[in-house]
Each structure stands twice: as structure tokens, then as C-alpha cells.
Image (spheres, grey):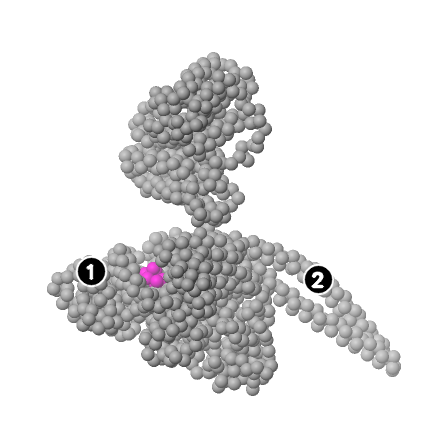
Amino acid sequence: MVACSRPESMDRGESPLPAGDDHRPEVAAGAGSCLAFCLGDTELALPLADVRETGQLAAVAPLPNLPGWIRGILHRRGEILSVVDLAAFLGLPTSQCAGPGQPYLLFRQPDFACCLAVARVGAVVHPEDRESVAPEAEPSGSARLAGLISGMCRSAGRDIPLLDSELLATALRCDNPRPGPERRAATDGSRGEGQ
Amino acid sequence: MAPAETTACADIRSSLAQLKESIRALAVDPGAPTARDEAHRLVRTLRQAAVGAEGLERLAACMASALDRAPAGAELPRPLVAALAAAVERCDDLIRGVEQGEAADHGQLLARTREDFAACAMTRPPAADGPEGGDFGEAVERLLAEELEVPAELFSEEPDAARPLSVDLPAPKAPPVRGPLFSEAEWEQLLIGFHEEAQEHLQTLQQALQRLQTANRDQEGCAVQAHREEIAAIRRAVHTIKGASAVIGLNEVAAYAHGVEDFLDRLHDGTRTLAPEAMAGLAEALELLGLLVASPEQAPPARREAVLARLEGSATTTRAEAAAGPVAPTAPPADYGRPAERALAQIGSATMRIQRQQLDTLIGLGNDLLASISGLERGLERFSTALTELEGTADRLKTSAGALAQLVAAGPDPTDRLALIARAVEESAADAVTVRAALEELRGDVASEFGGQQGLARDLQTQLLQARLGPMALLKPRLHRIVDDTAARLGRQVRLVVSGEQVELDRVIWEKLADPLMHLIRNAVHHGIEPPEERIACGKDPVATLSLGARREGDRVVIRFADNGRGLDFAAIRDKARGYAPSLDVEAMDERQLSDLIFAPGFSTRTVSEMSGRGVGLDVVRENVRDLRGTVGVATRAGVGTAFVIRLPLTMGVVRALLVESGGALWAFALADIRQLHRVDSRDISWEEGTVRLDGATLPWYSLPTLLGQVEDPVETSRPVVLVFAAGGRPVAVSVPRLVGRQEIVIRGLGSHLRAVPGVAGAAVLGAGQVVPVLDPAELIRAARLRADEDRPEILLDISRPLTVLVVDDSLSVRTVVSRLVASQGWRPVAARDGQEAVTLLAGLWPDCIVLDLEMPRMDGFAFLATLATMPTRRNIPVIMCTSRTGRPERERADRLGVRAFLAKPCPEEDLLAAIRRVTGLADPGATGQ
């Protein structure tokens, strides 16, 4: 997988997007444009048209009986949105900056929206070339990620795997929202059943 | 009168005179073909001559339309001949009025003429030798001979607006499709539904028309080829309106739409260029379609015919023909020149449609406003507390001032400094009292203003919510049809009695409830209701009753569906349970537990034909109800019947809630859910037994942090507050670490991603934008129990879990057919378009087997198999390859990649089912084979 290299603009201390706590990427940025982001050492991209906003997470209200990769819900511009730890969902090392202030992407598909918590939001890239790639067999347990990649977008000499928005939404929807092992462990044995 | 007008009048007079002769001939012999043709020709001539004389033209058009509709080749009905005669008289009146400078009210005359022709249309033609036949001919003769005047009372009748619109629409009291299946209210619902549907299509065609008009304007006529998409969109919309209107019996709309569609067909298939004239004609035709749907009285037959005639004329007009100018651009009459938008706006003049998303946004904003104002209430409470403290401070200052004064009086004070201080303190105390009084007054004003704002916000929110509500009556026609169909099919006699149909819920919720209710109905008729002869033998009415009722209960809607059939057959259910789960202690299960079994997924799919009780697909009922954050329960009595009770939360309303804190997060319970609230000593709680002693009673006890999957904090739970809820009809205690307070909240959904989470009724947004999950205590406890069940060897789920089959094929048809085949077995199909999507699905799915195509885009079957082999937890899922590439190399490669069965497309259903059974171990391999 491609290692996450910091975009030049970020190296200069600049945000790749206009300033502000939250920013709504302009759709007019161009069809086919992508937004790069990092999950730990992994750099990925999503079609810009499917990222409606980026920002920093405020307080997230946790919910019971859900897998660990769903952090909870938050309220954003009149809408309740779930917060997905994308790294945890994809089986990648989770971000060390989890919690308030962590960057997020507001990911939207028809009848579907959620906040994807990421480690860092990268630059808007305009793909010069895109090629179909078959998912590689990933020894690091990221087969899930391999199945979600629709191609590559190239930026500053780097090939960044591009996630298929539709597949991602399908995968996020299809997962059975049962408690993950980490949450199950918290419930085990803490009290007996009384009936 | 101008010479031209005089000439026109003369032409009209001449036409009218000839027309009278023709009608006289028809009155004598209604079957005379020559007289009929002549009358038809003269009516058209009259209409052409009357162009510009609006009333006369419309009367003539009315006559032409009536003649057009008359059955071809048969004799004209005598009432129609009489109506034609009367119409001619009215034309005479109009002409006479013009000549004498006394314009008659052509609107009234036209209305009367329409009524006459409408009455003809609704009258069965009498037999040629019928008793009234001869008299009628004489009556016509008399009418014509006496130069009948328009009755004076015609002008004293109700204005047009109050007249029934029976000419253009079927009379509401006799809609053609209602029959016994539709009540008046249902008919109204059908019409409303039609208008809503039609408006969507009118909007679609309007958008396409605008694009077409823009292109036409820019290019002074546009190539049809370049705009086929727009034309096709318009044609689809018109076609759909035609079909929908025909289905509910709006034949006038259907006929007109048919005419417009004919033009569009020709335009789409044959014409090279859409000339500006044809464009104008199309725009007018579509505008008229909108009018006809919305206000039929504004789209009379004459106008429809005129418009269709113009379309007919322009259909073959090419751009070159238009340039030559044989067809003059039709300047629409001023009355016809309204923009199409106005026609659209008139649809259902009492209603207005907006996008659901827009309404939801408004509701969300209204909720936020209310919650925000509710947050101010808490601020106001804090302000009052501060005022109370200020009052105490003032009192203490007064006391200090008094003490100082006593000190001054008791001893010498050479410098008067103590006296000065005492006075200063006394003045400060007085100032504090004054400030407090001013603040109190201010608080009163703010509180009053706040109360007003809160009332307004609540009204706003109520009205917005109201806009999404619909009565249960929305479902009634569908449910009646299901009852009738199922009963007829199974030879049962069943009536459906609906009560509480006025109970309102979000329309979306009713839609989601439709399937479960239909399922319950089919199930009841199929398995619960006895055949008539059996019912008679039992002393029952041979006609069984299904009752469906809805009522509000606090913050919930309770829907009860019951039948008076034979009830659940517990012996059969027990028998089935025993067969499916040998490890299950079936004999120890009580009736409540056995009743619960019928909701288990797949439990009943094998008992459809054998078990006399319920079961088929009831898991679907429970799942759908759960999606709505509701519950479903069942009660039954042998020989008496079975009742299902569905409870749904009113999630869109404002509720009073108790806020609690657990694990550092806020949570809310609806106050209506809480029966009691106690603070208990931790010694009253038995952790081992999971009980708590309350007022001498022992109740099941749970800790909220545990229910929420949080780590218990011993400090927090040393003296917990215990809330008592009802769960499963019994009181249950839940201890909460800390109470925060009460607040009015609006319960919302959890967003488009999560929809339903066990134990969570929804979420509320507090004034500061903080989101708080609202808990459903009964479901929270139920979810905890399920978790505990999952930790033990699965019993209930094991016996009932249907197979899950992942169908991977790039052909929609194959996916659909195979999925349906899988579903028909009571198994669960999941479809993927290609290998890549299947890999994605497998991240969260554990199917029992995979039916895999070979040739697919993005990732073919072999690539998928290679990827599957890298997934440690999924690599052993059996795969059946189903492909048209059945050569030896493909078979051998599939075999190497671990495919368990290889089938050639097209594959017989039984072969595929046998393969699934074999690879999943459902049947003996030797018995099934491929």
C-alpha cells in the first residue's frame, strides 16, 4: 500500500483547503477530482464530489450495541450523522488522534451519509490517469480495503488508491451492526442476568 | 357591425339553417348516414366560421366532440339528437344577441350544452323500437318548430363554479373503478394519489419542455434527433399520466393524453425538425394536460380538440414547410396563454407539494428551534437561582448593617467611622434589594417573552410535523384487496374490520408498516382462519373477522391485528421446535416462549404446509417493526383466535425526558417510560442475582453502564438512583450513575447510516447542539439478553437461521431470478454485481455459500476466487460456479481454485437448489447431486 506522504502545502503549514473550521469542498472543483487523506501511514482518496465537507470532530455521542468502528453520532447542520473510524473499519491501525479535533470527511451517497474520521485530510488532486486495478492479496488483513479500490489517482508523482464511493457505502451499510469484540468484552461478566 | 362581421354572421346563419335541416332529418331517422355525415360536416363548418366568436366556436366544438364520440356506424341516440337541436338553438341565441348588441352569457349556454351532452353520454341508448322512440322524434320536431327560447331559469341557477364537473370528470358519486372495493374516502385518496403522481410527471415534462424550448428558441427550430432524450422524457411522462388516469377511470384525461402521445410518437419517430409552430403547439398541449388534470372545467373538450387538431397539423411540418409558410403560426387565444407553471400550480388547489427532504429539513430546523428555546428555560432556572442567592446576600448585608449599628450605639465611636461603615453597609443592602427587584422584574419579562416564543416554536413544530402525518386509512384499500384476494384464493370467507383509521403517523411509517400488515393478513387467512364448513361445525360465523385497530397510547401508537380463527397450534410449534433443535429443552418451554419462536427467522418456512398455526415470514414482521423502533407481541387462545400487537414510538414528537449521565456521556429516557424513581442503598442490590429490593418487592435489576457496554465505576454506583420501567409487561429496575435533569426534547432518527440501533429510540439535540441518545429501556434490556444468549451456545438462532446465499453475477436478470429462487426456499439472498463488490460485501457478510458467475467486469470469477482464498475467515465458504463458459480448461481451473460445484448456464432451478443444499450440507450429497 502507498505510504502516506505529507502534501507539500501541508509541509508549508497550509491547509490544502481554504481556511475555516469546516469547509465544504466546491463541487465545481471538477468532475473526477479526488480528495486525498491519510489513515495512519496509508494514503487514500475519495471522489471529491462525494465529500461534502471536511472539518474537525466535536463531541461524539457514543451508542450501545454497535461495532467498535462506529464511534457514535453527532449533530451537524440539522442532521444526525454517524461517525465511522475508517481505519478501524478497513482493518488498518487506528489513528492516534482519535477524539475531539480529529479530522473528518462528510461522506455522502444517495440515502447515505456519515462522517469518516481520518488521521489527516490531504490535498485535492486532479487525476491525470486512472487505471483499473485488481485488489491485491493483502497479508496485513486489509482485504476489505482491496475490495473497495476502484483505481488510482496520481498526484505529485504518487499513485493514490481511490476508494469506490458506492462500494464503500455498500460495505458500511451491509456490516451487521453488532457489538464488536472490544465492546463485547466490556459487557462480559460485569453483572449477572437476574431473571 | 363591420362588413366582415356581417359576412361572418351570414355564413354562420347559413350553416345553422342547414344544420337544423340535418338534425330534423336525424330526428326522423337517427340512423340515416347521410344526415349524420352532413350534420358532422356542418358543425365543422360552423366551427370554422365562428373562429374568433369564442362562445359560438366553443358551442360548435362541443357539438363536434359529441358527434365524434358517438358510436360509428350505429344510429345516433335520440337524446343526442335532441341535445344537438338544443345546442343549435343556443347558437341562434348567441347570433341574435350579437346582431342586437345584447351579448348573451355564452358561459351559461355552454355549460348547459355540456350538461346535455354529458347526460346523453350517461344515458343508455333506447332500443330503436323503444316505447319513447316515436315521441322523442316529435319532441325534436316541436323544439325546432317552436324556436325554443333559452329558459329564463337558466340564468338564475348557480354559477358555473358550483356546478358538478361531470362533463370532464366522472361524477364523484359514480367513479367507474370504485365498485364495492372503494368507499368515498378511498376514492378521494385515489384521486389525491393520482394528482400527486401526475404532478411529478408534469414537472418532469415541464423541465424537458423548457430544455426543448430553449433549444428551439436559440436555433429557430431544433433537430429532433438532437433532442430525442427530452422528447422521450415528455412522452414517458404523458404516457404514464395516460395510464394512471385510465386506471382510476379519468377517461377524459386518458383520451387527451393519448392524443398528445400520438403526436409525440410521430415526433419521436418520424419528424426531422421541430418547427417553432409545432413547439408552440406542444407547449400548449402540455399546458392543457396540466389544466385537465388540475381543473378539468378549464380544459373543455372543444379546446382539447382544437389543441389536438393543431398538433395533428404540425406533426408533419418540417422546418422547410414551416419556412414556406403553409401553416401560420397559431397565436394562442389570450385565455389559453397561461404559462404551464400556472397549470401545475393549480393541481389540487388546496394542497401544495414539496420535496420530502425539504420538509424534513424544515422539521429539523423547527425541532432545533424548539430544543434551543427549551435550553433557554434551563438558563432561566439558573438565573432564578442566582436571584435567590442575591436575595440572601441582601439579607445578610442588612443583618451586618444592623449589627454594626448596635455596635455603634453600645460604645464610643470618636471618629464616627463605624457609623459611616454601618450606613454604607445598610445602603449596599438597600441597593442589593433594589437590584434584585429590578432583575426579578427583568426575569419576569424574559420569562413571559420566553413563554410566548416557546408557544410559537411549539406551534411551528406541531404544524410542520403535521405535514408529514397521514391516517391509517391510507393503507385501507390495499389491505382490503389483500384480504379479498387471499380469501378468494384459499376458499375462506373473511371480512376486515378497521378501526382507528384516523390515527395518524408519519406517512413513511405507514408505508413501512404496509408489508408487515399484509403479511399478517395473508398469514391469518392462510393459517388461522378455518374453512367455512369447519367454522360452522365449531359454532362460528362462517365469515371470519380480521380486525385491525390503531390507537394512541402516550408516546406510542398501538396497532392491534386480530383474527377469530383457530389460534396458534402450540403442539405443532413444539413439535417443529423439537425437530429443528434437538438440544433445545422444548418440553420446558411455556406458551409465551413458544409464541416467541414463531418470530424466529426461518422457523416457519418449513412449516408452511404442515403446521396449522402461524409462522410464515413472521420474522419479517418483527424485523420491519424493529426497524421502526417498535415491538410486536402475540397473544392467542385455542379456538378463539390470535392477536398481534405492534407498538411504535412517536419518534417525531416532542417529549419530556429525563437526562442522565453514564460513562461521561449524556443519555435520555422519555419520562413516559419511567414508572418510578428511587435512590437506593447499594446493599439492596444483589449483583449475583441481578435483583434489587424496592418497597418490599424484589425486581430484576440492571446497571445502565452495563446495558450500555460501559465499564462499571464503583464510585458512581455507590448510591445509585434506580429507575423502574416496564419491560415485557413486568417492572424492571435500572440503576443510573447520575441524574442531570428534565428537559423537553424532540426525538429524531439516528441518521441515514444507522437507522435502527437496538435499545436506542433515537437521538435528541439539546440547545447547545449537543446530541443525546434517547434510550428505549425495554429494548436495551432485550438487547442485553440477546448478547448474553449469543455468548451461550446458540439455541434459538441455530434452529431458525436460514441459509444466506451470495449471488455474484453481472446480469441483473440472473441476480434477480437466482435471488428470487433462493428467497423462495426461505433462504436469504444477497446480490453482488461482480467479484469486487462481492469482496466488499464479504467484509461484513458470512454467507453459507456463494453462487458465482465467471465472466464479470472489474473482477471476474477466477480473480474473486483468488481473493477469497486470501481471506482466512471466508476462504472455506463453498462456491458454486454457474457460467456459460463450460469448457474443460474453465472447469479444471475452477476445481483448482476450490469451486465445489460447477453448473452450466442456463441452469435448471432444481439443479441449482440441489447444489446449494449439497455444498451447505443441508441434504445428503448422494441424494441430491448436481
Q: Can marks 2 and 1 be said to lie on one chain?
A: yes
Q: In the image as oriented, which residue stretches furthest toward the top?
A: B3
Q: Nearer the viewer, mark 2 or mark 1?
A: 1
Residue at screen point 36% across, 24% down = B31
Residue at screen point 49% across, 73% down = B728
Q: Is B612 included in the stretch rendered in magenta? A: no
In the image, A97 versus B107, the foreground residue is B107
Task: Return the residue at label 1.
Answer: B907
Relative to B62, residue B487 above or below: below
Chain on which label 2 sits: B
In the image, B40 versus B757, the foreground residue is B40
Residue B108 screen position, x and y as percent: 53, 28
Chain on which label 1 sits: B
Q: Is A169 included in the stretch rendered in magenta? A: yes
Q: Quadrant for residue A136, please give it.
A: bottom left
Task: Return the residue at label 2.
Answer: B444
Q: Residues within 10 Å of mark 1 (few under 14, many from 20)?
A: few
* Residues rendered magenta in the picture: A164-170
Q: Say whether residue B878 is left or right of residue B325.
A: left
Residue type at mark 1: give it: Cys
Relative to A99, residue B190 above or below: above
